[in-house]
Image: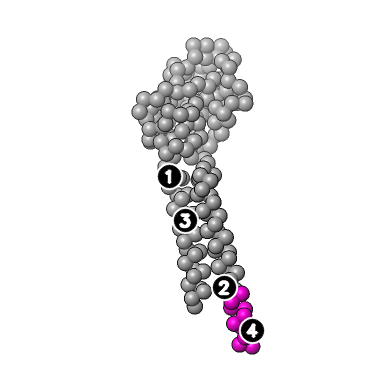
Amino acid sequence: MQLRQVTTVVAAGAASLVIGLSAPLAAAHDSVIGGNVVGDAPLEEFPREITLEFSGIPRDDFNTFAVSDTTSGDVLFDATPTIDGRNLTIDVPQDIEPGDGEYQVGFRITSSDGHSTLGSVPFSVASGAAGGEAGNGSSGASGQSDADAAAEDGGAEDSQDPLSSLPAAAKWIIGVGAVLVVGAAVFAFGAKTRRSGGEG
């Protein structure tokens, strides 16, 4: 009975450790809650600046936006946003005038919890006028940049596996907990087998 109790306690402790370390990370990343391109209705013209409002105040660390044409898949430009509280803003280059169409703002930010967060926000422009072609030549964005990857991600915010961002020490603790669980189970099984053999 004591061996079973030990095994149960170790298993419960390891499970609680995993849940306790991973659940807060999944909930803590900053998400988009507003901005001048966020809404159901199409914009009447392509904005000259783009602002996204986040649920927390992102850190002034590594932050980047990339704007792409979702129809063609082309990245129009990328830029490092300025931070004003929870608002992150980029200016649209003067030579970017794509006109009507479907677009998205991909972002990679450092959330207020210190973890890198990826996401994208779709928006559309429907002015009724024919779109210009001048802006379709990007102003230096490359397919190799992190911002491009963020723009093409197409997924929701907080797309990272919560455990992937755990520090090495926390991963080590979880690993040790798993080893203890397996070891306790093997020990209990062996003891039970020996008792059964003795009784036979």
Residue 191 spot, x, y in % from top left: 59, 77
Give the residue at mark 2.
188
Label 2 element class: helix
Label 3 element class: helix
Q: Do the residues labelled 3 and 2 touch (CB within 8 Å)?
A: no
Who is closer to the viewer here, 108 or 155? 108
Question: What residue is shown at x 54% (from left), y 57% (from top)?
Answer: 176
Give the residue at mark 1.
27
Question: What residue is shown at x 43% (from left), y 47% (from top)?
Answer: 24
Q: Which mark is residue 12?
A: none
User: Residue 192 in magenta?
Assistant: yes
Q: Which three-letter amino acid code belongs to the residue tagged 1?
A: Ala
Judge whether 6 appears above or below 103 on screen.
below
Q: Which residue lies furthest to the bottom in this view?
A: 200
Give the residue at mark 3.
17
Residue 119 spot, x, y in % from top left: 50, 34
